Image (tube, rainbow, N blue to C red):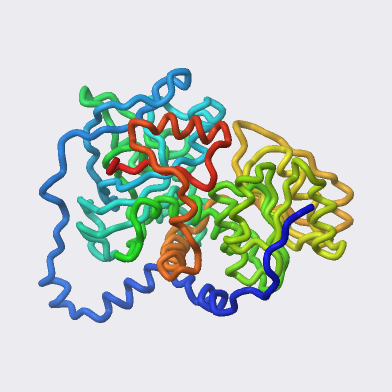
Amino acid sequence: MARTGPAGGPDVVATQYLRTCGTTRSSALTERQSSMTSNEAVQTPEKTISDTIPETMMAAVLRDPARGLQIETLRTPRPKAGEVLIKVAACGLCHSDLHVMGGAIAFPLPAVLGHEVSGTIVEVGPGNENIGLEVGQRVAGGFLMPCGQCEACASGRDELCGPFFELNRLKGVLYDGTTRLATTEGEPVAMYSMGGLAQYAVVPATAVAPVPESIDMVPAAILGCAAMTGYGAVRRGADLRFGESVAVVAVGGVGTNIVQIARAFGASQVIAIDVDDDKLAPMLDYGATAVVNSATHDARQEVLRLTGGRGVDVSFEALGIPATWTTALDVLADGGRMVPIGLGAGVQTAGVEINRTVRRSQSILGSYGARTRQDLPAVVELAASGVISYKEIVSRRLPLQEAGLGYEALHNREIRGRAVVDMSL
Protein backbone atom coordinates (compact mmCIF):
# COMPACT_ATOMS: atom_id res chain seq x y z
CA MET A 1 0.00 0.00 0.00
CA ALA A 2 1.01 3.60 -0.32
CA ARG A 3 2.19 5.34 2.83
CA THR A 4 0.57 8.55 3.96
CA GLY A 5 1.85 11.45 5.99
CA PRO A 6 0.24 13.21 8.88
CA ALA A 7 -3.10 14.88 8.31
CA GLY A 8 -3.40 18.63 8.37
CA GLY A 9 -3.73 21.60 6.10
CA PRO A 10 -0.92 23.46 4.35
CA ASP A 11 1.24 25.97 6.10
CA VAL A 12 -0.74 29.13 5.57
CA VAL A 13 2.06 31.35 6.86
CA ALA A 14 4.43 29.89 4.29
CA THR A 15 1.86 30.34 1.57
CA GLN A 16 1.30 33.98 2.44
CA TYR A 17 5.05 34.51 2.43
CA LEU A 18 5.34 32.91 -1.00
CA ARG A 19 2.73 35.23 -2.40
CA THR A 20 4.94 38.19 -1.58
CA CYS A 21 8.35 36.80 -2.51
CA GLY A 22 8.09 37.16 -6.28
CA THR A 23 9.40 40.71 -6.29
CA THR A 24 12.22 41.02 -8.77
CA ARG A 25 15.75 41.78 -7.70
CA SER A 26 15.73 44.74 -10.03
CA SER A 27 12.92 46.45 -8.13
CA ALA A 28 14.70 45.87 -4.85
CA LEU A 29 17.89 47.30 -6.30
CA THR A 30 16.04 50.27 -7.72
CA GLU A 31 14.65 50.98 -4.26
CA ARG A 32 18.12 50.68 -2.76
CA GLN A 33 19.62 52.95 -5.40
CA SER A 34 16.90 55.55 -5.05
CA SER A 35 17.85 55.96 -1.40
CA MET A 36 21.32 57.16 -2.49
CA THR A 37 21.98 60.71 -3.62
CA SER A 38 23.79 61.23 -6.91
CA ASN A 39 26.85 62.41 -4.98
CA GLU A 40 26.85 59.26 -2.86
CA ALA A 41 26.65 57.15 -5.99
CA VAL A 42 29.63 58.95 -7.50
CA GLN A 43 31.67 59.05 -4.31
CA THR A 44 31.31 55.34 -3.44
CA PRO A 45 33.57 53.50 -5.89
CA GLU A 46 33.20 49.70 -5.75
CA LYS A 47 36.13 47.38 -5.99
CA THR A 48 35.80 45.47 -9.27
CA ILE A 49 38.60 42.91 -8.98
CA SER A 50 40.14 40.80 -6.24
CA ASP A 51 43.88 40.92 -5.67
CA THR A 52 44.17 37.12 -5.50
CA ILE A 53 42.97 35.70 -8.81
CA PRO A 54 45.43 33.03 -10.03
CA GLU A 55 46.45 32.72 -13.66
CA THR A 56 45.33 29.09 -13.90
CA MET A 57 42.77 26.83 -12.26
CA MET A 58 41.75 23.18 -12.11
CA ALA A 59 38.65 22.03 -13.98
CA ALA A 60 36.91 18.77 -14.87
CA VAL A 61 37.05 18.66 -18.67
CA LEU A 62 35.08 16.39 -21.00
CA ARG A 63 36.97 15.63 -24.21
CA ASP A 64 35.70 12.16 -25.07
CA PRO A 65 32.51 10.60 -23.66
CA ALA A 66 34.31 7.24 -23.64
CA ARG A 67 36.97 8.61 -21.27
CA GLY A 68 34.69 10.73 -19.10
CA LEU A 69 35.80 13.73 -17.08
CA GLN A 70 39.50 14.47 -16.77
CA ILE A 71 41.05 17.01 -14.41
CA GLU A 72 43.05 19.60 -16.36
CA THR A 73 44.72 22.94 -15.78
CA LEU A 74 42.95 25.77 -17.63
CA ARG A 75 43.49 29.49 -17.78
CA THR A 76 41.39 31.24 -15.17
CA PRO A 77 38.55 32.91 -17.11
CA ARG A 78 37.91 36.64 -16.89
CA PRO A 79 34.55 38.37 -17.18
CA LYS A 80 33.54 40.68 -20.00
CA ALA A 81 30.75 43.25 -20.12
CA GLY A 82 27.74 42.30 -18.03
CA GLU A 83 29.49 39.32 -16.40
CA VAL A 84 31.04 38.40 -13.08
CA LEU A 85 33.76 35.95 -12.10
CA ILE A 86 33.05 33.78 -9.09
CA LYS A 87 35.33 31.57 -7.06
CA VAL A 88 33.26 28.41 -7.00
CA ALA A 89 32.35 27.00 -3.58
CA ALA A 90 30.35 24.07 -4.93
CA CYS A 91 28.70 22.71 -8.06
CA GLY A 92 25.76 20.32 -8.15
CA LEU A 93 25.62 17.16 -10.27
CA CYS A 94 22.53 17.05 -12.50
CA HIS A 95 21.04 14.49 -14.89
CA SER A 96 21.20 16.88 -17.83
CA ASP A 97 25.01 16.81 -17.54
CA LEU A 98 24.78 13.03 -17.87
CA HIS A 99 23.04 13.39 -21.23
CA VAL A 100 25.98 15.44 -22.55
CA MET A 101 28.56 13.10 -21.03
CA GLY A 102 26.91 10.12 -22.66
CA GLY A 103 26.64 11.80 -26.06
CA ALA A 104 22.84 11.75 -26.06
CA ILE A 105 22.74 15.55 -26.25
CA ALA A 106 25.13 16.98 -28.82
CA PHE A 107 27.52 19.57 -27.41
CA PRO A 108 30.93 20.91 -28.52
CA LEU A 109 33.99 19.27 -27.00
CA PRO A 110 36.21 19.81 -25.12
CA ALA A 111 33.83 21.26 -22.54
CA VAL A 112 33.42 22.00 -18.87
CA LEU A 113 30.03 20.95 -17.55
CA GLY A 114 28.32 21.84 -14.29
CA HIS A 115 25.49 24.34 -14.27
CA GLU A 116 24.33 24.92 -10.68
CA VAL A 117 26.91 26.73 -8.57
CA SER A 118 27.53 28.79 -5.50
CA GLY A 119 30.55 30.96 -4.81
CA THR A 120 31.99 34.38 -4.13
CA ILE A 121 32.36 37.19 -6.66
CA VAL A 122 36.05 37.96 -7.22
CA GLU A 123 35.76 40.16 -10.30
CA VAL A 124 33.03 42.30 -11.78
CA GLY A 125 33.12 42.98 -15.50
CA PRO A 126 32.21 46.35 -17.04
CA GLY A 127 28.57 47.28 -17.41
CA ASN A 128 27.57 46.16 -13.93
CA GLU A 129 27.69 49.54 -12.23
CA ASN A 130 24.01 49.77 -11.33
CA ILE A 131 22.93 46.23 -10.47
CA GLY A 132 24.26 45.92 -6.93
CA LEU A 133 26.88 43.22 -7.49
CA GLU A 134 30.36 43.67 -6.06
CA VAL A 135 33.53 41.81 -5.20
CA GLY A 136 33.17 39.75 -2.04
CA GLN A 137 29.47 39.01 -2.41
CA ARG A 138 28.36 35.42 -1.91
CA VAL A 139 26.06 34.34 -4.73
CA ALA A 140 24.11 31.45 -6.20
CA GLY A 141 24.35 30.97 -9.96
CA GLY A 142 21.38 29.89 -12.05
CA PHE A 143 21.83 27.44 -14.91
CA LEU A 144 19.47 29.36 -17.19
CA MET A 145 21.44 32.49 -17.97
CA PRO A 146 19.24 35.09 -19.70
CA CYS A 147 20.92 37.52 -22.07
CA GLY A 148 18.59 40.27 -20.86
CA GLN A 149 18.35 41.78 -24.36
CA CYS A 150 16.26 39.52 -26.59
CA GLU A 151 12.50 39.77 -27.10
CA ALA A 152 11.78 36.97 -24.61
CA CYS A 153 13.97 38.53 -21.93
CA ALA A 154 12.41 41.96 -22.55
CA SER A 155 9.00 40.44 -21.83
CA GLY A 156 10.26 38.76 -18.64
CA ARG A 157 10.32 35.26 -20.13
CA ASP A 158 13.91 34.38 -19.20
CA GLU A 159 13.22 30.68 -19.73
CA LEU A 160 12.69 31.35 -23.45
CA CYS A 161 15.88 33.39 -23.98
CA GLY A 162 16.91 32.75 -27.59
CA PRO A 163 20.64 33.50 -27.25
CA PHE A 164 20.91 31.16 -24.27
CA PHE A 165 19.74 28.23 -26.38
CA GLU A 166 21.34 29.28 -29.66
CA LEU A 167 24.74 30.23 -28.28
CA ASN A 168 25.29 28.56 -24.93
CA ARG A 169 23.29 25.35 -25.25
CA LEU A 170 24.24 24.67 -28.86
CA LYS A 171 27.70 26.20 -29.19
CA GLY A 172 29.04 26.38 -25.61
CA VAL A 173 29.76 30.11 -25.76
CA LEU A 174 28.49 33.28 -24.11
CA TYR A 175 26.67 36.16 -25.74
CA ASP A 176 29.57 37.72 -27.63
CA GLY A 177 29.97 34.39 -29.43
CA THR A 178 33.11 33.28 -27.56
CA THR A 179 33.87 31.01 -24.63
CA ARG A 180 35.66 32.30 -21.55
CA LEU A 181 37.53 28.99 -21.10
CA ALA A 182 40.80 27.91 -22.68
CA THR A 183 43.67 25.55 -22.02
CA THR A 184 47.07 26.95 -21.08
CA GLU A 185 48.00 26.59 -24.77
CA GLY A 186 44.99 28.67 -25.83
CA GLU A 187 42.70 25.86 -27.06
CA PRO A 188 39.06 27.01 -26.61
CA VAL A 189 36.96 24.96 -24.16
CA ALA A 190 33.16 25.09 -24.38
CA MET A 191 30.97 26.10 -21.43
CA TYR A 192 27.80 24.22 -20.50
CA SER A 193 26.04 27.14 -18.80
CA MET A 194 28.88 28.69 -16.77
CA GLY A 195 31.05 25.55 -16.72
CA GLY A 196 30.80 25.18 -12.96
CA LEU A 197 33.00 22.11 -12.50
CA ALA A 198 36.01 24.36 -12.08
CA GLN A 199 37.60 26.47 -9.39
CA TYR A 200 36.43 29.68 -11.10
CA ALA A 201 33.49 30.42 -13.40
CA VAL A 202 32.25 33.40 -15.41
CA VAL A 203 28.52 33.96 -15.09
CA PRO A 204 26.33 36.62 -16.72
CA ALA A 205 25.22 39.06 -14.03
CA THR A 206 21.61 38.27 -14.95
CA ALA A 207 22.06 34.73 -13.59
CA VAL A 208 23.40 35.35 -10.09
CA ALA A 209 21.60 36.23 -6.88
CA PRO A 210 23.28 37.32 -3.64
CA VAL A 211 22.85 34.96 -0.69
CA PRO A 212 22.87 35.99 2.97
CA GLU A 213 25.48 34.91 5.51
CA SER A 214 23.01 32.45 7.03
CA ILE A 215 23.11 30.29 3.90
CA ASP A 216 25.48 27.29 3.84
CA MET A 217 27.39 27.84 0.62
CA VAL A 218 28.12 24.22 -0.33
CA PRO A 219 24.54 22.89 -0.43
CA ALA A 220 23.44 26.30 -1.75
CA ALA A 221 24.77 25.17 -5.14
CA ILE A 222 21.47 23.35 -5.72
CA LEU A 223 19.47 26.57 -5.51
CA GLY A 224 20.40 27.50 -9.10
CA CYS A 225 18.95 24.40 -10.77
CA ALA A 226 17.31 21.75 -8.59
CA ALA A 227 15.48 24.29 -6.43
CA MET A 228 14.93 26.96 -9.08
CA THR A 229 13.60 24.42 -11.59
CA GLY A 230 11.23 23.07 -8.94
CA TYR A 231 10.05 26.59 -8.13
CA GLY A 232 9.58 27.40 -11.81
CA ALA A 233 7.53 24.24 -12.34
CA VAL A 234 5.19 25.01 -9.44
CA ARG A 235 4.98 28.79 -9.76
CA ARG A 236 5.22 29.23 -13.53
CA GLY A 237 4.52 25.92 -15.25
CA ALA A 238 1.58 24.75 -13.16
CA ASP A 239 0.55 28.10 -11.69
CA LEU A 240 -0.44 26.00 -8.68
CA ARG A 241 -3.50 27.22 -6.80
CA PHE A 242 -4.10 26.95 -3.07
CA GLY A 243 -5.88 23.69 -2.19
CA GLU A 244 -5.09 21.82 -5.42
CA SER A 245 -3.83 18.24 -5.27
CA VAL A 246 -0.44 17.26 -6.70
CA ALA A 247 1.54 14.18 -7.71
CA VAL A 248 5.31 14.31 -8.29
CA VAL A 249 6.68 11.51 -10.45
CA ALA A 250 10.42 10.85 -9.84
CA VAL A 251 11.78 12.39 -6.65
CA GLY A 252 15.44 13.09 -7.31
CA GLY A 253 16.91 16.54 -6.70
CA VAL A 254 14.32 18.44 -8.75
CA GLY A 255 11.39 16.23 -7.74
CA THR A 256 12.19 16.62 -4.05
CA ASN A 257 12.11 20.39 -4.42
CA ILE A 258 8.78 20.23 -6.25
CA VAL A 259 7.36 18.24 -3.32
CA GLN A 260 8.33 20.81 -0.74
CA ILE A 261 7.56 23.88 -2.85
CA ALA A 262 4.11 22.55 -3.85
CA ARG A 263 3.29 21.93 -0.21
CA ALA A 264 4.50 25.39 0.76
CA PHE A 265 2.33 26.90 -1.98
CA GLY A 266 -0.71 25.35 -0.32
CA ALA A 267 -1.29 22.05 -2.12
CA SER A 268 -3.86 20.02 -0.21
CA GLN A 269 -2.26 16.72 -1.17
CA VAL A 270 1.26 16.00 -2.44
CA ILE A 271 1.76 12.41 -3.56
CA ALA A 272 5.38 11.41 -4.24
CA ILE A 273 5.85 8.60 -6.79
CA ASP A 274 9.09 6.76 -7.53
CA VAL A 275 10.45 3.24 -8.05
CA ASP A 276 12.96 3.50 -5.20
CA ASP A 277 11.88 3.16 -1.57
CA ASP A 278 15.08 4.84 -0.37
CA LYS A 279 14.22 7.97 -2.35
CA LEU A 280 10.62 7.90 -1.18
CA ALA A 281 11.53 7.47 2.49
CA PRO A 282 12.29 11.16 3.27
CA MET A 283 9.45 12.60 1.19
CA LEU A 284 6.99 12.77 4.09
CA ASP A 285 9.48 15.01 5.88
CA TYR A 286 9.56 17.32 2.85
CA GLY A 287 5.79 17.74 2.87
CA ALA A 288 4.42 14.78 0.91
CA THR A 289 1.11 13.54 2.24
CA ALA A 290 1.62 10.08 0.74
CA VAL A 291 4.23 8.08 -1.18
CA VAL A 292 3.73 5.41 -3.84
CA ASN A 293 6.29 2.96 -5.18
CA SER A 294 5.21 2.53 -8.79
CA ALA A 295 7.44 -0.54 -9.19
CA THR A 296 5.44 -2.51 -6.62
CA HIS A 297 2.03 -0.80 -6.83
CA ASP A 298 -0.25 0.42 -9.61
CA ALA A 299 0.37 4.17 -9.39
CA ARG A 300 -2.94 5.09 -11.02
CA GLN A 301 -5.01 2.94 -8.68
CA GLU A 302 -3.17 4.17 -5.61
CA VAL A 303 -3.58 7.80 -6.58
CA LEU A 304 -7.27 7.31 -7.35
CA ARG A 305 -7.69 5.68 -3.94
CA LEU A 306 -5.90 8.55 -2.21
CA THR A 307 -7.94 11.22 -4.03
CA GLY A 308 -11.40 9.71 -3.72
CA GLY A 309 -11.41 8.46 -7.30
CA ARG A 310 -10.58 11.83 -8.89
CA GLY A 311 -6.88 11.82 -9.62
CA VAL A 312 -4.73 14.90 -9.00
CA ASP A 313 -5.20 18.41 -10.28
CA VAL A 314 -1.53 18.71 -11.23
CA SER A 315 1.08 16.04 -11.92
CA PHE A 316 4.77 16.84 -12.32
CA GLU A 317 7.12 14.60 -14.32
CA ALA A 318 10.74 15.12 -13.25
CA LEU A 319 12.86 12.51 -15.04
CA GLY A 320 12.26 12.74 -18.79
CA ILE A 321 11.60 9.14 -19.83
CA PRO A 322 8.48 7.69 -21.50
CA ALA A 323 7.53 5.55 -18.46
CA THR A 324 7.34 8.53 -16.12
CA TRP A 325 5.40 10.56 -18.68
CA THR A 326 2.84 7.74 -18.82
CA THR A 327 2.56 7.63 -15.05
CA ALA A 328 2.15 11.40 -14.78
CA LEU A 329 -0.71 11.32 -17.31
CA ASP A 330 -2.32 8.24 -15.76
CA VAL A 331 -2.76 9.87 -12.34
CA LEU A 332 -4.27 13.10 -13.71
CA ALA A 333 -7.83 14.17 -12.93
CA ASP A 334 -10.29 15.38 -15.53
CA GLY A 335 -9.33 18.95 -16.41
CA GLY A 336 -5.91 18.41 -14.83
CA ARG A 337 -2.51 19.75 -15.83
CA MET A 338 0.58 17.61 -16.43
CA VAL A 339 3.82 19.55 -16.13
CA PRO A 340 6.89 17.78 -17.56
CA ILE A 341 10.27 19.08 -16.33
CA GLY A 342 12.74 16.26 -16.97
CA LEU A 343 14.89 16.43 -20.09
CA GLY A 344 15.10 13.32 -22.24
CA ALA A 345 18.32 11.78 -23.50
CA GLY A 346 18.49 13.13 -27.04
CA VAL A 347 15.31 13.02 -29.11
CA GLN A 348 12.78 11.00 -27.13
CA THR A 349 9.04 10.68 -27.57
CA ALA A 350 6.28 9.68 -25.19
CA GLY A 351 2.81 8.42 -25.98
CA VAL A 352 -0.32 10.43 -25.20
CA GLU A 353 -3.81 8.96 -25.29
CA ILE A 354 -5.42 11.45 -27.64
CA ASN A 355 -9.11 10.87 -26.88
CA ARG A 356 -8.68 10.95 -23.11
CA THR A 357 -6.64 14.15 -23.29
CA VAL A 358 -9.22 15.83 -25.52
CA ARG A 359 -12.42 14.57 -23.89
CA ARG A 360 -11.17 15.07 -20.34
CA SER A 361 -9.77 18.56 -21.12
CA GLN A 362 -6.33 17.68 -19.80
CA SER A 363 -3.32 19.90 -20.49
CA ILE A 364 0.39 19.23 -20.93
CA LEU A 365 2.46 22.29 -19.98
CA GLY A 366 6.20 22.03 -20.48
CA SER A 367 8.35 23.83 -17.92
CA TYR A 368 12.05 24.58 -18.42
CA GLY A 369 13.91 26.12 -15.53
CA ALA A 370 12.38 29.36 -14.32
CA ARG A 371 12.51 33.11 -14.84
CA THR A 372 15.97 33.48 -13.41
CA ARG A 373 16.05 37.21 -12.68
CA GLN A 374 12.80 37.00 -10.69
CA ASP A 375 12.79 33.45 -9.43
CA LEU A 376 16.36 32.80 -8.30
CA PRO A 377 16.24 35.61 -5.70
CA ALA A 378 12.87 34.26 -4.56
CA VAL A 379 14.33 30.75 -4.14
CA VAL A 380 17.23 32.16 -2.13
CA GLU A 381 14.73 33.93 0.14
CA LEU A 382 12.74 30.73 0.62
CA ALA A 383 15.88 28.84 1.59
CA ALA A 384 17.14 31.58 3.91
CA SER A 385 13.79 31.83 5.67
CA GLY A 386 13.46 28.07 6.13
CA VAL A 387 10.35 27.73 3.96
CA ILE A 388 12.22 25.16 1.87
CA SER A 389 15.03 22.84 2.94
CA TYR A 390 18.18 22.72 0.86
CA LYS A 391 20.96 21.37 3.08
CA GLU A 392 19.20 18.07 3.74
CA ILE A 393 18.70 17.39 0.02
CA VAL A 394 22.47 17.18 -0.50
CA SER A 395 23.30 13.59 0.38
CA ARG A 396 26.86 13.37 -0.95
CA ARG A 397 29.82 15.76 -1.21
CA LEU A 398 32.76 15.00 -3.47
CA PRO A 399 36.07 16.66 -4.33
CA LEU A 400 36.52 17.93 -7.89
CA GLN A 401 38.82 14.99 -8.65
CA GLU A 402 35.91 12.60 -8.00
CA ALA A 403 33.29 14.39 -10.09
CA GLY A 404 33.32 11.55 -12.62
CA LEU A 405 32.59 9.01 -9.87
CA GLY A 406 29.70 11.18 -8.72
CA TYR A 407 28.13 11.16 -12.17
CA GLU A 408 28.62 7.41 -12.36
CA ALA A 409 26.71 7.04 -9.09
CA LEU A 410 24.01 9.36 -10.44
CA HIS A 411 23.74 7.27 -13.59
CA ASN A 412 23.36 4.14 -11.46
CA ARG A 413 20.56 5.78 -9.42
CA GLU A 414 22.67 5.62 -6.27
CA ILE A 415 22.24 9.29 -5.35
CA ARG A 416 19.36 10.27 -3.08
CA GLY A 417 18.50 13.94 -3.52
CA ARG A 418 21.56 15.69 -4.90
CA ALA A 419 25.33 15.21 -4.91
CA VAL A 420 27.62 18.24 -5.07
CA VAL A 421 31.28 18.84 -5.81
CA ASP A 422 32.71 20.70 -2.82
CA MET A 423 35.72 22.74 -3.92
CA SER A 424 37.11 22.80 -0.37
CA LEU A 425 37.65 19.02 -0.35
* Residue nearest the viewer, comparing 52 with 239: 52
Q: Residue at x 31, y 37 (%)?
A: 198
x and y percentages locating residue 48 in the rendered image: 16, 55
Question: Which residue is located at x 27 percent, y 42 percent?
Answer: 200
Q: Is residue 5 left or right of 110 when viewed as pictured?
A: right
* Count of picture labels: 0
Instruction: Name above or below for residue 102 compared with residue 165.
Output: above
Say which residue appears at 30% left-offset and 51% top-offset. Answer: 119
State left or right for residue 279 relative to residue 406: right
**Hey, which quadrant is residue 179 in on the image?**
top left
Residue 287 seen by the camera: yes
| Residue name at image x 48 percent, y 36 percent | 97
Closer-to-camera residue (122/275): 275
Foreground pick, 19 / 266: 266
Q: Position of residue 13 (x, y in %)?
A: 55, 79
Examine the rendered structure and indicate whether residue 215 appears above or below residue 354.
Answer: below
